[in-house]
Amino acid sequence: MKEFNDKVAVITGAASGIGRGIAEKFLQEGMKVVLADIESKALAKTGEELKEISSNVLTVVTDVSKIDDVKTLAQKTIDHFGAVHILCNNAGVGFATKSSTTVWENSLSEWKWIFDVNLWGVIHGIHVFIPIMLKQNCQCYVINTASMAGLISPTIGI
């Protein structure tokens, strides 16, 4: 994509970090941006701050681990902006327990939560947004973000 002006981007995990950075850059390039995040207060704050760059910001509280939330995100995007050209599957989580805990000591519910967000969140995004993008019959992209944690393995005994 060479021209970003007036294109629409949906970014999950957009209330902070990489997602917020992507959103800011897209707005500076003239894009319309949909910010999605599960953290409602942080999302609202980020949305207000980014509206100082451009009014073309929509915030949607979204839990990417829930397919219905992702469907709602897509519908609100289409209702508000009429299209989607870039999907950034950026939402991601890690183990929330103390850093000295070895990975195998984490509860099964923590493992499930991580897989629901980090794997199923991406699958839900692709499943819901790709058919919309294909129907638009124009150049569209999906960007899946991975953290360094996805590229390294923990050392046993440390």
Image (spheres, helix red, strand yellow):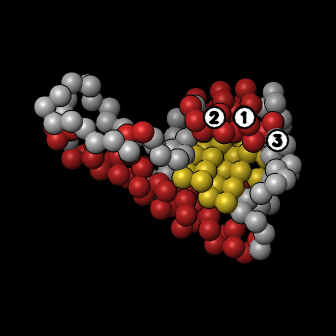
Whole-angstrom CA distance, mark 1 to mark 3, is 9 Å
Is residue 5 toward the left or the right of residue 153 in the image? right
Q: Position of residue 113 (x, y in %)?
A: 34, 47
Mark 3 Cα shell of 10 Å, populated few (<14), some (14-19), many (≥20): some
Residue in the foreground of this view, choosing between 57 and 144: 144
* Secondary structure state at the residue bearing disc 2: helix
Residue beneath the point at 62% across and 68% down: 130
In primary-sequence order, the first of circles 1 and 3 is 1
| Image quarter (top left, top right, bottom left or bottom right) of the N terminus | bottom right
> Which quadrant of the view contains residue 95?
top left
In the picture, the disc for residue 29 is 3
Residue with the mark numbered 1: 24
The amino acid beneath tag 1 is Glu
Q: Which residue is located at x 52 percent, y 35 percent?
A: 39
Q: Are marks 1 and 2 in contact (CB under 8 Å)?
A: yes
Under circle 3, the secondary element is loop
x then y, percent, for residue 61: 58, 43
Q: Looking at the image, which is closer to me, 151 or 135?
A: 151
Tag on residue 64?
Answer: none
Q: Is residue 5 visible?
A: yes
Identify the mark nearer the N-term, 3 or 2.
2
What kind of residue is marked 2? Arg
Please identify the quadrant where the C terminus is shown. Answer: top left
